[in-house]
Image (spheres, rainbow, N blue to C red):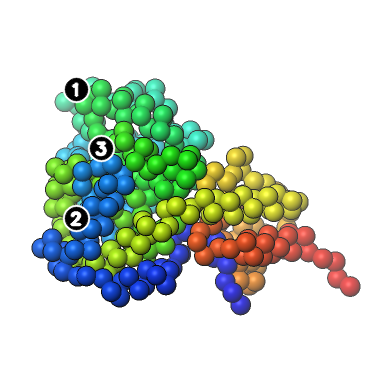
C-alpha cells in the first residue's frame, strides 16, 4: 500500500538528485571552516536572503535558539507571539539554555502581532524590568494556518523595532512558501529583519538542516553559540550538498504544493461534517475541524484521533491538531492522486455506506 503522508512537510525524503549530490560532495572539516560544500551553502543562502553571512545548523530550533542567544544576554527579554513555534515547540530553550525571558503577545488570525501590542510591550528603562532586546516573527505562521506575513507588515515591525534600538529575528522556516504565495522573493521578505532562519528539511526536501543568516558580526557570535550547543559538525558537506540542491531545485516549485493544498481543501469542503478554517489554505497547510456528531464515538474517544486511526488503516496519515481538528500538509511527495485518495478516505469514514 502506498502511504500518503500529510502529517507535515518534515516527512519529505531527499530526491534522487540530492542523494547523488550527497554521494559526490566535496568534503572537509567544517569545525575548521574547511568544508567547501558547507561554505558554499552558507554563501548561497545568505545571498538568497539578502544577508552578509549564513550559518548551517542542524535544525530550525537550533537556528532560532542560536539567534536568540546571539542577540540577547541573560535576563534580557524577547517579544514573540503566543502561537509562535519558538514559544510552543522549542522546549523553552531560550529560557532554559539562554536565560532569556519571553513576553508572549497574542497573534492575530493572520499571524501578525499588532504593532500597538509590540509598542506597549517594550519595557521602560527601569531597574525592575528585564531589558527588551529582541522581537521575533514567524513566516509562514504554522499555528495560524500557514499564513504568510507581507513585506509591508514585516517592514512596519522592523521600523518600530529599530526606532527603539531593538533587533528583529524572523523564524522563516517556510519563508520560501511565503515568497511563493505572495509572488515576491525571500530576500524582500527578509529585508527588514536583522536575522532569519529557514529550514532545508521541510518543503525543500533536504534530509537535515537549516540556515541562519544575518550580518557577519552576528553570524560570528552565532557560530560560537552553535559550538556551545554541540552543533559543530565535521564533514557536514554531505548534508549541505542536499541543501544546495534544495535551494537550486525546490524553491521555485512550491506553488505546486500550494495548488495541491487548494485541491485538497476543495475536495474536503464537499464532505458533510467537515469545516474548513476560514481562508485555508494560505500556502501548503489545510486546517479543518469536524462538526459535532458527525461520527459515532465511544464516551472516551477523541473524534480526530479516531478518524486519524481509521485513515491510517487506509494508508493516509494526517496530523491531529486538537480534539476535533486536523492539519494536513502538502509537499513534493504528494501528487494529485494522493490528494484524491485522501479526500475519498475522509468521505468514506465520515459518510459510511449503509450495509447491504
Q: How many marks?
A: 3
Whole-angstrom CA distance, mark 1 to mark 3, is: 23 Å
Q: Residue at x 71, y 63 (%)?
A: 344
The numbered mark at residue 125 is 1
Whole-angstrom CA distance, mark 3 to mark 2, is: 18 Å
Residue at the outermost left position: 32
Q: Nearer the viewer, residue 137 or 41?
A: 41
Can residue 98 be seen? no
Mark closest to the chain's N terminus, 3 or 2: 3
Residue 111 vertical placement versus 60 (above, below): above
Q: Which marked residue is nearer to the observer: mark 1 or mark 3?
A: 3
Query: Which type of secondary structure does the marked residue at label 1 adopt?
Result: loop
Residue 323 image offset from top left, x and y in percent: 59, 53
Mark closest to the chain's N terminus, 1 or 3: 1
Residue at the outermost right position: 356
Residue 93 image offset from top left, x and y in percent: 28, 51
Residue 210 image offset from top left, x and y in percent: 31, 56
Residue corresponding to mark 2:
226
Residue 340 image offset from top left, x and y in percent: 67, 62
Where does the N terminus fall, quadrant-wise?
bottom right
The numbered mark at residue 194 is 3
Q: Which marked residue is nearer to the observer: mark 2 or mark 1?
A: 2
In this picture, residue 93 sits left or right of residue 246: left
Q: Are marks 1 and 3 in contact (CB under 8 Å)?
A: no
Where does the C terminus fall, quadrant-wise?
bottom right
Residue 315 vertical placement versus 329 (above, below): below
Amino acid at each position: 500500500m502506498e502511504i500518503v503522508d500529510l502529517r507535515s512537510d518534515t516527512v519529505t525524503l531527499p530526491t534522487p538528485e540530492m542523494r547523488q549530490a550527497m554521494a559526490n560532495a566535496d568534503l572537509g572539516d567544517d569545525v575548521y571552516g574547511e568544508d567547501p560544500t558547507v561554505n558554499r551553502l552558507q554563501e548561497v543562502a545568505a545571498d538568497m536572503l539578502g544577508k552578509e553571512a549564513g550559518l548551517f545548523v542542524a535544525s530550525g530550533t537550533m537556528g532560532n535558539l542560536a539567534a536568540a542567544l546571539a542577540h540577547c544576554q541573560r535576563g534580557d527579554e524577547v517579544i514573540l507571539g503566543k502561537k509562535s513555534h519558538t514559544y510552543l515547540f522549542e522546549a523553552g530553550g531560550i529560557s532554559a539554555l539562554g536565560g532569556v525571558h519571553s513576553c508572549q503577545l497574542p497573534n492575530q488570525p493572520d499571524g501578525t502581532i499588532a504593532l500597538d501590542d509590540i509598542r506597549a510591550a517594550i519595557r521602560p528603562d527601569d531597574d525592575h524590568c528585564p531589558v527588551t532586546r529582541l522581537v521575533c516573527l514567524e513566516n509562514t505562521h504554522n499555528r495560524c494556518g500557514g499564513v504568510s506575513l507581507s513585506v509591508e507588515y514585516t517592514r512596519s515591525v522592523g521600523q518600530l523595532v529599530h526606532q527603539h534600538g531593538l533587533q528583529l529575528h524572523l523564524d522563516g522556516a517556510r519563508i520560501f512558501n511565503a515568497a511563493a504565495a505572495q509572488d515576491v522573493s525571500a530576500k524582500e521578505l527578509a529585508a527588514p529583519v536583522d536575522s532569519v532562519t529557514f529550514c532545508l528539511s521541510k518543503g525543500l526536501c533536504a534530509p537535515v538542516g537549516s540556515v541562519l543568516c544575518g550580518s557577519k558580526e552576528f553570524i560570528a557570535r552565532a557560530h560560537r553559540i552553535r559550538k556551545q550547543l554541540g552543533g559543530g559538525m565535521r564533514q557536514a558537506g554531505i548534508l549541505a550538498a542536499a541543501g544546495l540542491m534544495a535551494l537550486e531545485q525546490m524553491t521555485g516549485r512550491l506553488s505546486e504544493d500550494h495548488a495541491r493544498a487548494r485541491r485538497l481543501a476543495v475536495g474536503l469542503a464537499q464532505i458533510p461534517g467537515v469545516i474548513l478554517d476560514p481562508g485555508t489554505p494560505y500556502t501548503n497547510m489545510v486546517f479543518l475541524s469536524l462538526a459535532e456528531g458527525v461520527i459515532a464515538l465511544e464516551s472516551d474517544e477523541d473524534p480526530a484521533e479516531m478518524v486519524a486511526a481509521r485513515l491510517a488503516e487506509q494508508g493516509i496519515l494526517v496530523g491531529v491538531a486538537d480534539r476535533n481538528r486536523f492539519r494536513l500538509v502538502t509537499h513534493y511527495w504528494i501528487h494529485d492522486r494522493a490528494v484524491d485518495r485522501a479526500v475519498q478516505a475522509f468521505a468514506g469514514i465520515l459518510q459510511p455506506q449503509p450495509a447491504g
